[in-house]
Amino acid sequence: MMKKLKAVVPATTANLGAGFDTFGLALSLYNEFEVEEHDGVVIETVPENPFLEKPENNLFVQVLKYMCEKRRKTFYGAKVKQISNIPVARGLGSSATAIVAGILISAAVSKTELTDELFFETAYRFEPHPDNLLPAWKGGFTTALLSEGKTYYQKIPFPEDIKAVVAVPDFELSTEKARSVLPEKIPLKDGIFNVQRASLFLTALINRRYDLLKIAMEDRFHQPYRKKLIPGFDDVLKEAYNGGALGVSLSGAGPSVVALSVENHQEIGERMVYAFRRNGVQSSFMVLDVDTEGAKVEILE
Ligand SMILES: Nc1ncnc2c1ncn2[C@@H]1O[C@H](COP(=O)(O)OP(=O)(O)OP(=O)(O)O)[C@@H](O)[C@H]1O
Ligand SMILES: N[C@@H](CCO)C(=O)O
């Protein structure tokens, strides 16, 4: 009988510019979820987060409950300890880590084989974004689409020498709000613009043509609309490029900005933080590797 389990799940940066709702990359920053049997729900968060300590706000607990009830079992509760290194609502896939952890732990406890069907059927009830969910689960760089209820995806190797410099503003932006500013329709020329760049991004990675990443990460689907919610966005991109970044984009739905680079990571980060500050936004930066392994579950007792 398994009594105590732990899941460790990486942060993710979705979109990477032109690959809106498609590309995702796992990063070496992790949330940890420890859970043991308990009567009633008790959630401890480190650092303390009163919002996530309420079971109704906590996606990890919601997923545990859903998967338990799906097996026609009563959910009596759980004692949860979450160590959160990934800031919430900053476009770094915090919610995806909670969903992935809940699914993997539930499958381990019930000794259920975790098929793609089970994973996506459960995950999409809580968040419809495979571009965060997939890399959080599998690690590395992924491309995904959902068609007629089935998710088609591929994971391809991401160059090991590229690191991600992530500038994280001190304000939250929910995915819901960041999606509400997007238009219903996109002009054909913008569709062509993004298809060309997303294709170039993939081929530039495969052929190690890092000089092409700057143009390949341009976007007309979401960044032009979302940047109104992020003071200094254009300035931050410019500074990251001045510091030597290869390609820069909004991270997921934002407000964080991610710069890919093989060198000058410190300088790029400092320039991004400086550009945010010039625009009245406090921020901090992290230099992260690509996580290649994805989520892990460990039986502690
Ligand atoms: N670590 C977590 N543990 C449990 N629930 C979470 C966690 N992070 C987020 N949530 C829940 O998911 C909701 C939606 O989060 P939201 O999508 O806005 O943020 P995010 O995942 O940090 O950002 P993004 O998806 O853009 O990367 C939050 O309001 C909260 O209820
Ligand atoms: N692709 C999604 C990711 C949400 O985290 C978006 O940009 O809205």
Image: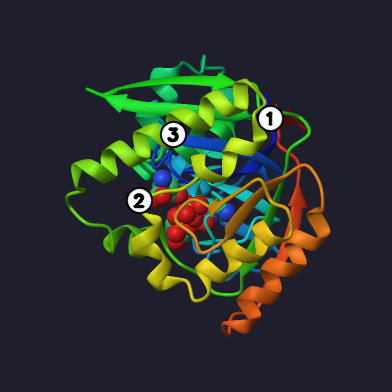
Residue 218 appears anywhere in the view: yes
Could you tell me residue 14's position as x and y percent?
50, 44
Separation of residues labelled 1 and 3 (CA atoms): 33 Å
Please rate how many residues cluster around mark 3, counting C-alpha atoms within 10 Å: few if below 14, some from 14 to 19, many from 20: many
Separation of residues labelled 3 and 2 (CA atoms): 11 Å
Depth order, front residue of 106/164 = 164
Q: What's the amino acid at mark 1?
A: Val
Q: Is residue 10 above or below residue 250?
A: above
Could you tell me residue 37's position as x and y percent?
62, 41
Q: What residue is pinned by disc 1?
A: 297
Q: What residue is pinned by disc 3?
A: 198
Q: Residue at x 55, y 21 (%)?
A: 155
**Residue contact at pointers 1 and 3, CB within 8 angstroms:** no
- For the N terminus, the image quarter is top right
Q: What's the amino acid at mark 2?
A: Arg
Q: Residue at x 40, y 42 (%)?
A: 20
Which quadrant would residue 211 be assigned to in this image? top right
Q: Earlier in the sequence, mark 1 or mark 3?
A: 3
**Which SS class for mark 3?**
helix
Please rate how many residues cluster around mark 2, counting C-alpha atoms within 10 Å: few if below 14, some from 14 to 19, many from 20: some
Q: What's the amino acid at mark 3?
A: Ala
Q: How many marks?
A: 3
Q: Earlier in the sequence, mark 2 or mark 1?
A: 2
Q: What residue is pinned by disc 2?
A: 220
**Which SS class for mark 2?**
loop
